Image (cartoon, helix red, strand yellow):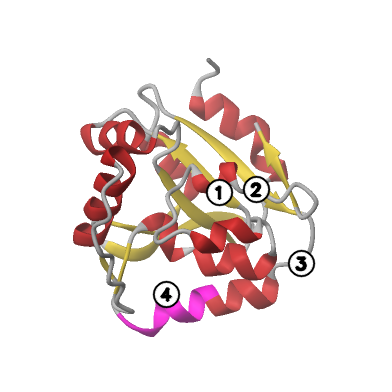
Amino acid sequence: MEDIEKKYNRLRPQITNGCLILFHGTGFVARVIQNCDKSYYNHVGVVVESGGALFIVDANADGVQADRLSWRIRKYRHGGDFTVIKPKFDTSVEMERLLDRSDDSWIRYDYNNGIKELINRKFGANLKIKLKDNKSICSHNVAQYAINLGIVTWDFKKLRIAYPEDYIRYMNTTRSIQLD
């Protein structure tokens, strides 16, 4: 497997504003998500370009926020990996909606619903998911963005909570491409 920082340097010229970036981590929480969801990827965010610098907007333990993408890549350097889903058209209107929601209020990480959905997926349970506007998990935070752009299929909308691998499972290849 290619080193994550070398891969980032190779793909960096193709990563632009509005791309989704999915991460494969090796930590405990990452492995739990991967196991329960039968997935490779366990985290997702949206790339925002500003002044030539790339940032990732995502929901994590600290809430919804932006970090430098290169810094986040380095956090995954011990066995981590990533892929990029790049929309094939202008994303500016949907990016503005996503960023307005992220900037509108403090959005905390939704541990309860995230855990419930992992149990639902792992064991075929049917625990009730009750979403709130002030809480989100990484993959659900960008779900409406992906739906509005059409970079996921309509079956994606049927998910109670989207998880990172769902963006691959339900990727609309007529509207987006995957960069590896």
Q: Give coordinates of residue 22: x percent, y percent.
A: 50, 43
The segment highlighted magenta reads 98-105
Does residue 142 lie above or below 15 as drawn?
below
Mark linked to residue 102? 4
Quadrant into which the C terminus falls:
top right
Q: Is tag 4's residue or tag 2's residue first in the polypeptide sequence?
A: 4
Counting from the top left corner in percent of width and height, residue 81 is at: 48, 29
What secondary structure prevails in the magenta region?
helix
Q: Secondary structure at mark 1?
A: helix
Question: What residue did someone put label 2 on?
Answer: 171
For image coordinates 23% across by 58% down, the residue present is 127
Between disc 1 and disc 4, whose residue precedes? 4
Occupied quadrant, residue 169: top right
Amino acid type of the residue that numbered disc 1 sits on in the rendered structure: Tyr
Residue type at mark 3 is Asp
Amino acid type shown at disc 2: Met
Residue 96, by quadrant, is: bottom right
Mark 3 lies on a secondary structure that is loop
Q: Position of residue 10 (x, y in %)?
A: 66, 30
**Sequence-wise, which precedes: disc 1 or disc 3?**
3
Instruction: Say which label, 2 or 3, has the lower sequence index.
Output: 3
Label at residue 90: 3
> Is residue 123 rendered to the left or right of residue 141?
left
Would you call the spot at circle 2 few (<14 residues within 10 Å), some (14-19), or many (20 or more)?
Answer: many
CB contact under 8 Å: marks 2 and 1: yes
Q: What residue type is disc 4 on?
A: Ser
